[in-house]
Amino acid sequence: MFDIGFTELLLISVVALLVIGPKRLPTAARVAGRWVGRIKRGFNTIKEDVERELGADEIRRELRNEGILEKERKMLSDATYRANHMFSDKPLENLLKDSTSSKDSSSADSAASVDKEKPS
């Protein structure tokens, strides 16, 4: 984070010794250490929270995309199923057979009803 070498640390400690004095220097060092520790813990906590939120957002995005893909797959399979049954040869042949057989049976029924009405 900071590029502080041994000479810089030595210079800071000499200045602190001269400004604060030898009696209060250990107490000041302890207080400074506590503050630095609190700041580091705070930054680490914030960093972990941000990483957790980014991970949660990514997971939500993946789940949403999977849900959308699943819906699209289902819609596609339903459409394919309908198209296969709508345009397949078998149902068309059955429809043609049904329509011709219904014409034959209706003409046979009408002929039978005509025969019943006529006295012999």
Image: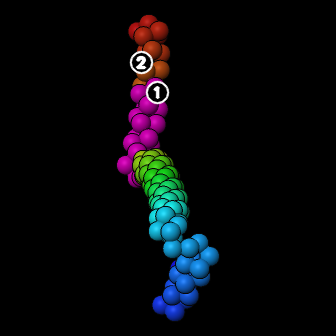
> Across the whole image, how many numbered discs are drawn on residues?
2
Magenta segment: does it hold 98?
yes
Percent coordinates x, y for residue 90 in the rendering: 37, 49
Residue under numbered circle 1 = 107
Q: What element carries label 1?
A: helix
Q: Which of 114 and 70 is in front in this view?
A: 70
Rendered residue at 41%/28% (across/down): 105
The amino acid pointed to by label 2 is: Ala
Q: Which of 97 and 78 is in front in this view?
A: 78
56, above or below 18, in the image: above
Q: Nearer the viewer, residue 112 or 106?
A: 106
Residue under numbered circle 2 = 112
Q: Nearer the viewer, residue 76 or 84?
A: 76
Magenta stretch? 87-106
Q: Is mark 2 on a helix, strand or loop?
A: helix
Magenta segment: does it hold 100?
yes
The amino acid pointed to by label 1 is: Ser
Rendered residue at 52%/67% (across/down): 24
Rendered residue at 41%/36% (across/down): 98
Residue extending farthest bottom: 7
26, above or below 84, in the image: below
Percent coordinates x, y for residue 19 in the rendering: 62, 76
Measured in 3D between alpha carbons, the distance from the residue under mark 1 to the one under mark 2, in whole angstroms, is 9 Å
User: Taking 1 as reference, is 104 left or right?
Assistant: left
